[in-house]
Amino acid sequence: MRRPIRCSIAIRDFFGPSSNDFRQTVANLNRVTGNLRDRVPDILDQIHGLLGNVNVAIDRAKQGLAEIQATGTNLHSASASLRSILTDNQSRLNGIRRFA
């Protein structure tokens, strides 16, 4: 029974005229929201710039990977051509080894 009475007394003291806590809290909230209102556009601009830089980096990485893939394809083709040449000229190479 005492607990609800203590709770109601604390609420009365917080909101009552004898305490300045509630008014100070509201003033602080007003100041904080004003600061946020002023800062949010700058923060959003910075995030937008950061995302633009990330997009550029991703595009460059994609280009680099495409070049690596093309190089791998060319290397595969070149090694297949070399294998074909060596297979076609196997008997000539064996003859050269015999005389050497």
Image (spheres, helix red, strand yellow):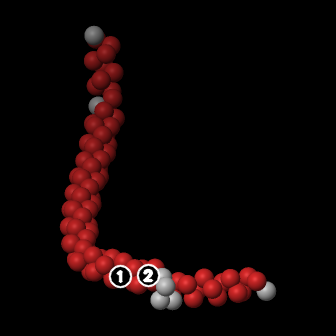
Q: Are marks 2 and 1 in contact (CB under 8 Å)?
A: no
Q: Amino acid at mark 2?
A: Asn
Instruction: Say which element carries label 1.
Output: helix
Instruction: Say which element carries label 2.
Output: loop
Q: Is residue 72 visible?
A: yes
Residue at image position (27%, 18%) is 96
Q: Amino acid at mark 1?
A: Ala
| Frontmost residue, 88 versus 60 | 60
Label drawn at residue 27:
1
How far across and how far down the image is residue 28, in percent? Answer: 36, 78
- In primary-sequence order, the first of circles 2 and 1 is 2
How far across and how far down the image is residue 54, in percent? Answer: 26, 62
Does residue 21 lie above or below 12 as drawn?
A: above
Q: Is residue 81 visible?
A: no
Does residue 84 lie above or below 62 as drawn?
A: above
47 sits left or right of 5 in the view: left
Label drawn at residue 70:
none
Mark 2 — residue?
A: 20
